[in-house]
Image (cartoon, rainbow, N blue to C red):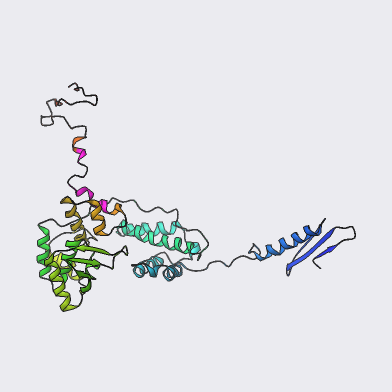
Amino acid sequence: MAIEQLPDGRWRVDVEPIKGKRFRKTVKTKAEAQRFEATKRAAMIQPTNWNPKPKDRRKLSELVQRWYDLHGHSITSGRRRTNTLLLMCQRLGDPLGTKLTGAHLVELRRRELEAGAVPKSINNRFTYLKAVFNELHRLGDIDYPNPLAKVKPLKFQERQLSYLTAKQIPQLLDALDSSRSSCVRLVAEVCLATGARWSEAQGLTRDLIRHQTVTFTNTKSKRLRVIPISQALEQRLTAYLDDHGRFTDCSRAFRIAVAHSGIALPRGQCSHVLRHTFASHFMMSGGNILTLKEILGHASLTMTMRYAHLSPSHLRDALKLNPLDGFDTSSTPATKPKKKNLKNQSGGATKP
């Protein structure tokens, strides 16, 4: 019997919730004895040190695959990102997920930098791997903290976005005319006219072109974008798609045409240069930055602000509020520059 009363009126508890684990205690009241028994039985149900949870023995590549099964399949670049992560697993030696540390990643990062990898690409891969642990932890698939939480991304000099000048645009179009691909120039013109990504323009179908607008559906942000185009471009697009059904993959043909055109572009900005060209010329012509954000489909204004410096009015205050404003700087160095008669904040003239 788990609880019994002694001759002196006290109560003895003798409980064995599991084989080999026995608890005994003498208390004054029966209620106290019942609480002690219930407490010990409940404690044995919970996983404690004597009944530990099995260790997670999954390798890093298995965690990446698990991330894809639970979450990665639902994002646009899920399969491509998974393949990138699996290559990272190989370079890291595919350790157990519980054994991975920030030092492993930093060491891999050092080797990639010495091999000439682009810092931005390294940061992207680091962000992908960090997101794997964050997502699995959020879903309860792992119970240990993110081992990469304290690793900081690389800091690098931001590259200037390249764009085609007014002279280079016809130069490129002439090179595209010489391409074997029948649709490469048309896809490039869509990108130049709308700021679309190459994959968005190449994915256009006949039903997405109507009333002098094109609708992009396969977008990175998962949002539809409807952009107006000229009547002439609409007629050429509909005529081609009526005859051929859809565009073929002509990205390689575009890269070859760019190489033949003689236009030098920074590494990694080949097909994206068309999108940069649209955005740059839009801002240089006095376009609104918020309108550009909607046209490009950026999720945040931060991305669009990369083109803000091209606006004619951007930071023009630097011309009139700099400390040299008001000085006659046309004199020779041997001559002391004369400052013009300026009004101070109180309305009086400043002394020369």
- Horizontally, residue 257 falls left or right of residue 18, namely left
Q: Is residue 134 left or right of residue 333?
A: right
Whole-percent x, y for residue 109 in the image: 37, 58
Q: Residue at x 17, y 62 (%)?
A: 193
Q: Which of 262/286 is in front?
A: 286
Residue 175 picture location, percent across and down:
11, 66
Q: Is residue 333 above or below residue 157?
A: above
Q: Quadrant of the N terminus?
A: bottom right
Q: Is residue 64 magenta?
A: no
Residue 333 placement (x, y as % from top left): 13, 29
**Picture coordinates of residue 58, whole percent (x, y):** 49, 69
State which region is magenta: 304-318
- Residue at 13% x, 67% y: name it: 233
Residue that protrudes farthest toward the front in the picture: 211
- Res. 51 visible in picture: yes
- What residue lies at 29% left-to-right and 54% top-to-bottom? 303
Specify whether residue 86 is in view.
no
Out of 272 and 297, give the one closest to the viewer.
297
- Is residue 104 or residue 324 the one in the foreground? 324
If the image is split into quadrants, where does the C terminus sit? Answer: top left
Assess whether residue 306 is covered by the magenta stretch: yes
Q: Residue 184, relative to residue 167: is it above or below?
A: below
Magenta part mainly helix, strand or loop?
Answer: helix
